[in-house]
């Protein structure tokens, strides 16, 4: 049974359809990415899954529980980090972790948790005096206070510097190793590519594709580019029969090949067969960002202010 | 995955930690801590100087009948009408209540914890006020101590109900403080906070006496000098509780 299953979720606010018939299936122990630009409906979708919003229609099951009917039970096993929620500003790190831990029947030892998120030095610092990265780390600690079996992390690293971002990523990797199911809402390609097994791309309230990051790139059918140099004049006919190849351009001794699939492997073996020695090979693969653009038809920054 | 998750509500330990957390929030908000405790003492001192040595003014024992009830009513009104709603409004605006609703804790726990802390702060304020009056101005305990405590309790409930009303209608923490202060001063001015209500135009004084601040001052004053309670004051406070609570319940939002 999947850890999280949402079927046919719909949610509208007035005339705006925030979530339009979304299906999401998250397997136990996987890190599942929800990728989309701001305003695409990601947060509404996951907050509905967390039972914080009631869908207009559709069903949700999280760890075998209905987020509305079994609300009290689900709260014990689902950790949530909300996008812009604050905590008691004048309370100190250790006080907040202890407070949130007390809400749960079982869970992490507060001091261990503080150490795990790297806030031991700040344990006596008020929340309002922490840096953005430290506040984010505390927010994760609070989401993990009850020792959850599944966690929803909404915009985990938005606004963090690169070092803090990497710190958050390694925390998610730790969760994955502990077998915790993670739903990671993001609009950052690098983050999703690095952490997630499966990724759902959400655009205008709909899921436009679900696959592994590599699968999404392949599915977008984008060309890869291979460049290399040859010692003698190159005969393009050498690559004639290779079905991955789409175009070949030989410019004196510099050759540029575009194509799809496992282009590098296919071209390499054709060159070996024809006894052509290639040097200085450079390979450019389409990125998840290219795939995202191809699948949604817009650059991700275009609605950044939404 | 098929193992069942037992239902679990935060227990007494969690309540204790939450109340302690709210107490720290209040204690670390310097102005919210000091003003309700300091203002009544200031009122006592000012009146002590003004009435210096006079036990009675036109036959009425001034401190017992008037100054003490005003000082104590200021404590409970300030905390109930201004401070508590500003915390709730801040919790709502910063989505703290929403964050809590994603945990096994009910955001209503925070509300309850705030009220508990407010009551403790009020008791401290009342004790400080009474102790200062007894030490420096030779004021005795109320003649009818039980009645005085009961009336103060009723008045505190009234102020909290008004505070809930403020929290329900205020769109932001700043608005909450502004609305709270306006209500506080309006009730206070008509209820004797700036001087005996005898100095006010008669219709204003009559209305002020059945508004929560004035009703509390009159009722506490009666208990202090050993007079019988007048039903009008008690009914006025009960009515304020019912009206404020009803509106608060209708309008209160957990979400910003």
Image (cartoon, grey):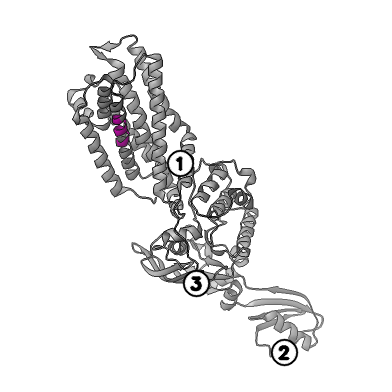
Q: Main secondary structure of the magenta part?
A: helix
* Residue B166 as seen in the image, left or right of residue B27: left
Q: Position of residue A105 (x, y in %)?
A: 50, 54
The numbered mark 2 sits on a residue in which chain?
A
| Vertical relation: B237 (above or below) A27 | above
Secondary structure beneath disc 3?
strand
Q: Find the magenta span and give its range.
A: B150-157
Residue A152 badge? none
* Residue A66 as seen in the image, left or right of residue B143: right
Q: Position of residue A82 (x, y in %)?
A: 49, 55
Discs 1 and 3 carry the same chain letter:
no
Residue hosting label 3: A25
The numbered mark 3 sits on a residue in which chain?
A
User: Which numbered mark, 1 or 3, is in the foreground of this view?
Assistant: 1
Mark 1 and mark 3 in contact? Answer it, CB < 8 Å: no
User: Which numbered mark, 2 or 3, is in the foreground of this view?
Assistant: 3
Residue at 68% across, 81% down: A263
Is residue B43 covered in magenta?
no
Q: Position of residue A97 (x, y in %)?
A: 55, 48
| Vertical relation: A11 (above or below) B150 | below
Residue hosting label 1: B19
Is residue B155 covered in magenta?
yes
């Amino acid at each position: 049974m999947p850890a999280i299953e949402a079927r046919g979720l719909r949610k509208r606010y007035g005339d705006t359809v925030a979530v339009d018939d979304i299906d999401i299936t998250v397997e136990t122990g996987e890190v599942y990415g929800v990728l989309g630009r701001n305003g695409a409906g990601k947060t509404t979708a996951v907050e509905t899954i967390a039972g914080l919003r009631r869908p207009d229609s559709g069903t949700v099951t999280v760890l075998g529980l209905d987020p509305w009917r079994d609300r009290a039970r689900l709260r014990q096993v689902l950790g949530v980090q909300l996008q812009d929620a604050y905590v008691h500003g004048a309370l100190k790190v250790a006080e907040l972790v202890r407070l949130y831990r007390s809400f749960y029947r079982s869970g992490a030892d507060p001091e261990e948790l503080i150490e795990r998120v790297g806030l031991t030095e700040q344990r006596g610092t008020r929340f309002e005096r922490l840096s953005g990265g430290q506040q984010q780390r505390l927010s994760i600690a609070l989401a993990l206070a009850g020792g959850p079996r599944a966690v929803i992390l909404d915009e985990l690293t938005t606004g963090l510097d690169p070092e803090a971002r990497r710190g958050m990523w390694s925390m998610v990797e730790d969760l994955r190793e502990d077998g915790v199911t993670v739903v990671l809402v993001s609009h950052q390609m690098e983050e999703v590519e690095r952490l997630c097994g499966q990724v759902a791309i959400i655009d205008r309230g709909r899921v436009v594709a679900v696959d592994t990051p590599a699968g999404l790139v392949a599915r977008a059918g984008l060309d890869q580019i291979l460049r290399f140099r040859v010692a003698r004049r190159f005969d393009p006919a050498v690559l004639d029969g290779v079905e991955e190849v789409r175009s070949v351009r030989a410019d004196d001794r510099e050759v540029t090949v575009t194509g799809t699939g496992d282009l590098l492997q296919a071209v390499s073996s054709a060159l070996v067969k024809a006894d052509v020695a290639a040097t200085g090979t450079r390979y450019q693969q389409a990125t998840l960002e290219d795939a995202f653009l191809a699948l949604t038809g817009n650059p991700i920054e275009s609605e950044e202010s939404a | 995955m098929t193992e069942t998750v037992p239902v679990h509500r935060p227990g007494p330990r969690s309540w204790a930690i939450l109340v302690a957390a709210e107490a720290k929030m209040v204690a670390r908000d310097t102005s919210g801590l000091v003003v309700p405790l300091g203002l009544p003492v200031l009122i006592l001192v000012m009146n002590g100087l003004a009435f210096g040595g006079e036990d009675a003014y036109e036959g009425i024992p001034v401190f017992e009948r008037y100054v003490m009830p005003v000082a104590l009513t200021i404590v409970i009104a300030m905390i109930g009408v201004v401070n508590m709603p500003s915390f709730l409004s801040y919790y709502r605006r910063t989505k703290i209540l929403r964050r809590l609703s994603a945990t096994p804790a009910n955001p209503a726990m925070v509300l309850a914890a705030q009220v508990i802390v407010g009551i403790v702060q009020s008791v401290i304020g009342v004790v400080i006020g009474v102790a200062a009056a007894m030490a420096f101005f030779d004021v005795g305990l109320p003649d009818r101590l039980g009645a005085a405590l009961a009336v103060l309790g009723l008045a505190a409930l009234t102020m909290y109900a008004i505070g809930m009303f403020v929290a329900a209608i205020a769109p932001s923490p700043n608005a909450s403080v502004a609305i709270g202060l306006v209500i506080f001063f309006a009730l206070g001015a008509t209820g004797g906070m700036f001087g005996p209500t005898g100095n006010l135009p008669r219709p204003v004084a009559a209305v002020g006496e059945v508004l929560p601040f004035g009703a509390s001052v009159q009722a506490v004053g009666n208990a202090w000098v050993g007079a019988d309670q007048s039903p009008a004051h008690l009914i006025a406070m009960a009515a304020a509780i019912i009206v404020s609570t009803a509106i608060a319940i209708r309008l209160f939002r957990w979400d910003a």
